[in-house]
Amino acid sequence: MKRLLQCRTRADMRQLVKVCMALLFLFIIFNIYKRWSKSHDGRHIVLWYNPPFYVTSRTDAFVRNFDECPQANCRLTFDQSEAESSKAIIFDGRQMTKDCKSFSRPQDQMWVFWGNEPPTKYNEAGDEWMDFAKEFNLTMTYHRESDVYMPYGEIVPTMPIPQKDFLSIAQKKNHSVVWIASSCHTSSWREMYVKELRKYVDVDIFGRCSDAMTPWNCGNRWKHDDCFSVLNDYKFYLAFENSLCEDYITEKFFENYNYDIIIVTRGGTKSNFKDILPDGVYIDAMDFQNPKELGGHLKQFLNDDKKYANLLERKSAYTSLPYHIVYQKSLCNLCDRIMYPEVYNVARYDNLRDTLHEINFCKHPSDLERKHQR
């Protein structure tokens, strides 16, 4: 009897092993089919290989894909195991390392250089990315001449135009100028510009560049909440960029535009913001020879509520679109180029580092006296 039970137990174990092996085999087959079906559903796979924090932290944008694009035949993935089967791969270009070449690249695969920083900052994280400078087929940046234009935002006409008592808004403001910044040593020398500007108008500074050097902890990073309404207490907000590079207009402008405040910009080259932004809805520091001249101009509005209210009213005719809408539009434009590379003359760049060199797009400040320059 004991021997019979032992035989039955062994038989049951063998049967259990067979069942487990069968289940394992089915699991493997299922995953192979799942991967095969993804890559054979007729759509071009587009892999975001190393999506940057700027995008992942903006969940409204990060969840976007090609589904809302008209007639798009692309599928977005973040699964690096699909690298070799992808038609195109998006890289945060300046963050690339040798690990980005851990797969075999098909001959017809397109590489996309994504970047939201100016060329002056491309080597901040190291220069390994330059090993890939001859590997890219497309650029996807804030610059208008990129293959795929992906700005930080977009200003469009307001429909309908809001009806507000702008004079009352102006009269309730009890502060002059505000600047929020955490990077205090920049190639644009904005920190020195603000220091000089404070001699002529009151400027409150928040963030690590403030007198107390305390961080700006209002809301989550890149997520505006009610505490940002403090901007409505001021007449002017300084949206000064860290670099003076062509078309480089960041979230400092777009994400603060819709507050009841007038933005003062300092960036771009040769005041080229005028080619991108509507006229008369902001003040460009580059239109003035120095901080003293800008300060004198701001005082005209600080001392005249009616004149300031007229500026607010002109500004209200336009609004800043949410970033996810701009991001979605760029994704759709990218898919078009992936679907029809011949139409868009997609080809590999000879050397992207030479194409995107700061000499071609950036300049040194010319609106500070020599004594302020490093």
Image (tube, rainbow, N blue to C red):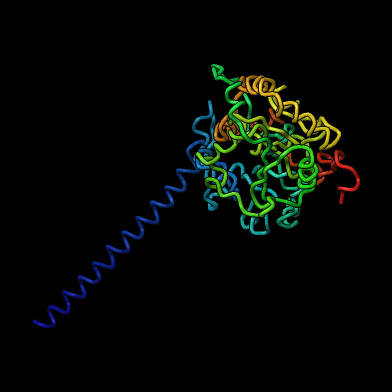
Compared with 133, 22 (above or below) is below
Q: In which quarter of the image is the N terminus?
A: bottom left
Q: Where is residue 371 in the image (x, y as percent from the top left)?
A: 90, 48
Please indicate whether residue 204 sits to the left or right of residue 28 in the image.
right
Check the image and report above or below for 247 versus 305.
below
Give x and y (percent) for residue 115. Answer: 68, 43
Task: Give the quadrant of residue 280.
Answer: top right
Q: Which residue is drawn at 86% across and 47% down?
A: 372
Q: Where is residue 28 in the image (x, y as percent from the top left)?
A: 40, 56
**Number of on-image labels:** 0
Q: Which of 296 and 116 is in front in this view?
A: 296
Front residue of 267/26: it is 267
Q: Position of residue 343 (x, y in %)?
A: 68, 28
Residue at the limit of the structure toward the left, as seen here: 1
Please state if 238 lies on the left or on the right of 229 as rendered: right
> Residue, x 65% and y 31% (percent of image)?
235
> Can residue 147 be seen?
yes
Residue 110, image quadrant: top right
Front residue of 143/46: it is: 143
Give left or right: position of 241 versus 319.
right
Whether residue 114 is visible = no
Q: Horizontal placement of 178 versus 64: left or right? A: right
| Residue occupying the far right of the picture | 370
Q: Which of 146 and 119 is in front in this view?
A: 119
